[in-house]
């Protein structure tokens, strides 16, 4: 990369995207971020995204309203559906869970691509990981590679640019424990992040949804407690 | 296709998407449609989209709010920029014009994919055409093919389905004149459609933007007048 290349980081306010932000910073990119008010059950994660953007000195942080709940079909956007809760991480099933949101990463990456085009940013960062994840199809490397190919044909900026659009997935092959290790090395304050699908009043993590359980396991494997659960 | 397969048609209310709707109907699909309030300069085309959906007996018509104008960068979403006007179609330049909206078809197709997933529709129709068009990169066949590949890796529905997601582009190799011919054969009332980028009060086409000029040329080549200009 050249100095001062611009990156757009998909920033949910969770553990993974906060780590992604820190990695993009450590690689020398000018940081720009995009977050989504997409009809999720709660707004706490957006507050965390804003705080993280401020802490990391993000240049331009766009919060986009796009109601994916309009279509229905996910426990993350439909409060009449229950978010599955379990006692421990081994109870998480193998099939794609009801917290799956239709085409979410495709919609989010498309909007990141649009935002990137308007600021001439060709490096997009998304904190997907294919290990310790919830089985979502749009977190796999073959999906990301395919999106990247499409992106390079899609926009005025990508077809006119001499350098390609790149979708960076620095966490894709890491376990949750490794992600945490990486982030702690870069000084990420995980107490500022929220991963829970269904937090209690005030943004207190439930401790039992897939996101909480995977995260707790990651901290436990690092012999740490999760600072967001204090 | 099987009888009663569901289609999702991207319906702007313009000439091309109305023709697409008629073609999907003629092929026997159950019609569903998606339209976007994306920050465009005027709301007239959405009124036309609604009227067309009603006329064609569309099962489920979703109108999605997504403000692509938030990022700036296009004369279609920024009323401080002028839409280029010309006297005739040969004056339209070769470069990608200022009416280009960043990543628009990628965002729209992504949301069509999401909507399709929630109703189990794997056939998406988009009225792009690569002839008599405005030079947008996201109207070319290689872009559409690439989006289709990505879509088949992106969703729970696409990875679990035995049949692939298909992006139908029945107009892609047709001239505007041929599109009009096709639509008239299927009984499309083009007086109900609006293609103009910058209509006057009441939704009267300006007659001089690229969209108006290309459309007028199409009708002229059919020795017809444009019924929307009456």
Image: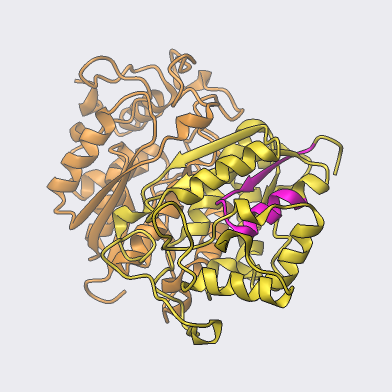
Chain colours: A yellow, B orange
Residue A91 percent across, percent down from the top left: 49, 86
Q: Is residue A111 magenta?
A: no
Q: Nearer the viewer, residue A207 or A104?
A: A207
B138 versus A148 height, above or below: above
Can you say which quadrant of the picture contains the C terminus of chain A? bottom right
Residue A226, quarter of picture: bottom right
Q: Which residues are magenta?
A: A5-23
B224 versus B188 height, above or below: above
Q: Nearer the viewer, residue A187 or A137?
A: A187
Residue A173 percent across, percent down from the top left: 72, 71
Can you say which quadrant of the picture contains the N terminus of chain A? top right
Q: Name, please, the residue furthest toward the right.
A: A2
Work out whether residue B115 can be spotted.
yes
B129 horizontally vs A222: left or right: left
Q: Nearer the viewer, residue A208 or A119?
A: A208
Work out whether residue B224 can be spotted.
no
Q: Nearer the viewer, residue B199 or B131?
A: B199
Q: Is residue A16 magenta?
A: yes
Residue B74 percent across, percent down from the top left: 51, 26
Residue B172 percent across, percent down from the top left: 45, 49
């Amino acid at each position: 990369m050249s100095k001062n290349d611009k990156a757009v980081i998909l920033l949910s306010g969770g553990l993974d995207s906060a780590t992604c932000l820190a990695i993009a910073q450590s690689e020398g990119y000018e940081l720009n971020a995009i977050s989504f008010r997409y009809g999720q059950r709660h707004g706490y994660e957006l507050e965390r995204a804003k705080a993280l953007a401020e802490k990391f000195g993000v240049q331009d942080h766009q919060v986009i309203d796009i109601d994916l709940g309009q279509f229905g079909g996910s426990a993350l956007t439909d409060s009449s559906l229950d978010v599955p809760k379990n006692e421990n991480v081994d109870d998480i099933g193998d099939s794609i869970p009801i917290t799956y949101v239709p085409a979410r990463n495709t919609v989010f990456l498309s909007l990141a691509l649009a935002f990137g085009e308007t600021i001439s940013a060709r490096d997009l960062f998304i904190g997907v990981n294919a290990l310790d994840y919830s089985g979502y199809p749009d977190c796999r490397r073959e999906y990301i590679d395919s999106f990247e190919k499409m992106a390079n044909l899609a926009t005025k900026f990508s077809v006119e640019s001499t350098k390609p659009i790149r979708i960076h997935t620095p966490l894709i092959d890491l376990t949750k424990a490794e992600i945490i290790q990486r982030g702690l090395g870069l000084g990420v304050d995980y107490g500022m992040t929220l991963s829970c699908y269904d937090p209690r009043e005030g943004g207190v993590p439930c401790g039992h949804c897939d996101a909480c359980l995977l995260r707790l396991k990651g901290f436990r494997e690092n012999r740490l407690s999760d600072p967001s659960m204090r």
